[in-house]
Amino acid sequence: MKRYLFYLLALECLLLGLYACREKVSKEPGPDQRVTNEQAPPSDLKYSDTLFVQFGRNAISVEPTVNGSRPMIFELVNVTDNRFSINSQTGQITVRGGVPAGTYSLSVKATNAKASYIKNNALVVVVWTIVPSRVEYSPSFVVVDSGTAYVTAAPTTNASQVTYRIQNRSEVPAGIVIDSLTGIIRFPDTLRSNIYRIRLQLVNSAGAFSRTDAFILVVRPRGYTPGAYPTWTWEIRPILARRGCTNCHITRGHITGIGTDYQALVNKHQEVMKRITIPAWEPFIMPPPAEGYDPLTPEEIQTFRKWAEGGFLR
Ligand code: HEC
């Protein structure tokens, strides 16, 4: 009997406990239930504005507006270019420099506890380009032995969608070709010993730009070894080309032909030494710093000096 009573009591307790639990649930809803009541799938995702980006720059979009319960995770859909990225928490889209000029429609996937949803063409990104104003080969001056082919690296430029061409086409052998899309220049192994200077033109939808001596290749006779004294042809001339003297001091221009003419340079040697050795802050230093040229190095100046000592070898 005592035993039965005990069991009865236990059962009663259990039932009471269960009841109390139920009461609690229905009277004051817990946090879990609140979420369940208000859960809504993501919908109506929108960015208020098109994102305009100048080529080469970084840009970040506004946060999108979107309906639906939080937390929500945002992802880009079908984007393989990792220069586009999205902040998974805020939905802001970042475009990093280097994306080619053009218009891009980005689709975004929003996911919450209830559902996933894809908004096609959620954000339009317009990358616009500027007129090219800079171009750089690295290196931009190379010396090879004759019989050697040479291929440049692709140049860097500050503009997008650029087409490259050799502007001084008539001055360079036809065997020298340029890839118009990359700017890579190929010099064949058949070039005779000489200095080949490339005047490069860049064109895109915004405009055009050209650069004299954008790339210079010196093809020296095979097995050439410098003698005790420098020569005009293989030591002085490359310096003149590399340092822009050839560019400005043309043979029959309003300034002297010291850049291209052996005799003119010999005749002007004293003046040249003066101009390349005066301190950089003095006016009249050559090449002119105001035009963006650096002063000659001590080694280059020494080459000019030794050239005179050796009797101006040709
Ligand atoms: C950006 C163009 C430019 C470059 C590059 C340049 N020069 Fe000149 N150079 C000038 C101009 C313009 C003058 C005339 C004005 C003057 O005398 O400063 C001149 C004058 C000179 C003169 C004196 C004029 C004469 O004929 O007696 C010498 C010598 C000279 N340059 C040497 C050089 C040498 C060497 C280099 C290369 C290391 C060089 N220049 C690079 C533009 C240039």
Image (cartoon, grey):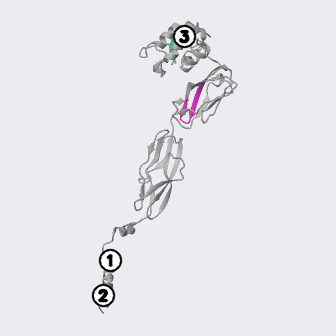
Magenta stretch contains residue 241:
no
Which amino acid, by three-letter code, is at mark 1? Cys
First in residue order: circle 1 vs circle 2: 2
Residue at which label 1 appears: 21
Q: Quadrant of the N terminus?
A: bottom left
- Please report the bounds of the magenta region as a residue range: 198-209
Q: Is residue 70 above or below residue 63?
A: below
Q: Nearer the viewer, residue 54 or 7?
A: 7
Which amino acid, by three-letter code, is at mark 3? Lys
CA gap between label 2 and label 3 equals: 118 Å
Instruction: Decide: few, some or many residues near mark 2? Use Cα within 10 Å; few <14, some 14-19, many ≥20.
Output: few
For the point 33% across and 76% down, which residue is it? 26
Which disc is residue 306 wearing? 3
Instruction: Decide: few, some or many residues near mark 1? Use Cα within 10 Å; few <14, some 14-19, many ≥20.
Output: few
First in residue order: circle 3 vs circle 1: 1
Q: Nearer the viewer, residue 59 or 17?
A: 17
Which amino acid, by three-letter code, is at mark 2? Phe
For the point 56% across and 6% down, which residue is it? 267
Q: Is residue 215 above or below residue 239?
A: below
Q: Nearer the viewer, residue 276 or 95?
A: 276
Q: Position of residue 274 (x, y in %)?
A: 48, 10
Which disc is residue 6 wearing? 2
